Amino acid sequence: MKGELTASLGGNRGERTQNSDSIYTSPSGEQEMLIPRRSLMLVRNVGMHRYTDAVTLPSGAAIPEHVLDALMTSLAGLHDLNGTDVLLRNSRHGSIFIVKPKMHGPDEVAMNVALFDRVEDELGLPRHTLKMGIMDEERRTSANLGACMEQAKDRVCFINTGFLDRTGDEIHTSMEAGAVVPKAQIKGSTWLTAYENNNVSVGLNMQLAPGRGQIGKGMWAAPDNMADMMAAKIAHPQAGASTAWVPSPTAATLHALHYHYTSVLDVQNEMLAVCSAETETERAASLARLLTPPIMPEDDVAKLKLNDDEVTRELENNCQSILGYVSRWVGQGVGCSKVPDIDGLQQMEDLATLRISSQHLANWLHHGVCTPEQVDTVLERMAAVVDQQNEGDAAYNPMAKDVDASFEFQAARDLIFQGRNASNGYTEETLGMYRRKVKGACAGGAETIVA
């Protein structure tokens, strides 16, 4: 917000800084034009399910973290609203842009609208200064997206599919319906295509676009594979999206080229004509596709022709992904980051990808696709793989030598074996509990961390 953010690229590769806007003068010298040189910055708050003891109630109880987040990020936004340098302005019209994730339907959106009112009152801001981005990443929001946007009609500036968290929610929501298909097959599921299409269609029907706000698409999770990203993410503007999540400034710069190849405005206008002509029967069919769970046929494994080796490979992929991320989160306090997958390829892992992997294994355990003994065996084998992948990290806590004494390993195991009963399949409560254990052990001066 102050234009002072920098990031070293390491070695002799230089430093990233924020550019100032540029002023161009017309040939006649009579007019000046301000050209923005930075992307519009939105701040993402935490989900409503999180609690923090950074601030406590008089009773000592923790408070909802999203309340503190809304207040503090808005307070930081005052640097932009009150700034005097016109060449380093984020908002052109005096707004602060806050993205709200993991909201479950219109009632939770309405609660956040009321929270934004209170924050504005507390900071002395005009009503509707705080604009809201709605992440469409929980099934109840997907099925009621128009109603969600209506609740925030004076604030909504952005809607976005978040297919990673949305997949985790879909698995958890379908937990009792049956065994879900392998992760790779979920990407081709009926509900996922309907979900991506529905987000754009609703955004157009609610007149967020063209011209009034952004319709976005989800993350590219392979930060070192830009060639494949360039081949794949062109589909986003072609689908009517005007923005998308990317894992790095480099990826953002490359993805920006896609919007020069495709006129999103033309695409949206064409789609709007189609959406306007859609019948109630067609809308009902779209909703039915959206609500189609990605479960196996009744004779599950046999009909999908999954043999023991394929089940084992699925377990290995999930367990390695979980351990690779959890070992850093619990052991070092490192969240979203690049983590090598089972083949050593760097992948972006975060709470959403963890939610998918842990819920997928919880579902397969619940429906007997695999046994607890199989999962434990694979977990221990993958712990050794993850240890080897991190052997050059001095801050890393090895797991395989004593899995019973490893907080990181036990956290990963709990996420799987207790995943069926985890609220909405969220992982933060388990991660936070084990992270506190690690910090407590370190504070106690223990040379080794033991459970």
Image (tube, rainbow, N blue to C red):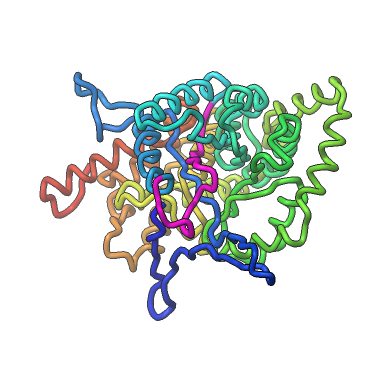
Tell me, yes or no, whether the highlighted magenta stretch contains residue 95: yes
Q: List the single residue furthest toward the bottom.
A: 12
Residue 9 position in % (x across, y down): 42, 71
Residue 179 relative to residue 432: left or right: right
Image coords of residue 11 (percent x, y) = 38, 78
What are the residue bounds of the magenta stretch? Answer: 82-103
- Is residue 202 visible in the rendered structure shown here? yes
**Residue appearing at x 48%, y 53% in the figure:** 89
Identified at 30% across, 52% down, the residue is: 332
Label the magenta part by its dominant secondary structure: loop
Q: Position of residue 248 (x, y in %)?
A: 52, 60
- Camera-nearest residue between 344 and 42: 42
Query: Dividing the image into 4 quarters, which one contains the C terminus?
Result: top left
Q: Is residue 348 left or right of residue 182?
A: left
Vertical side of 426 occupied by 90: above or below: below
Residue at image point 52% right, 38% down:
361
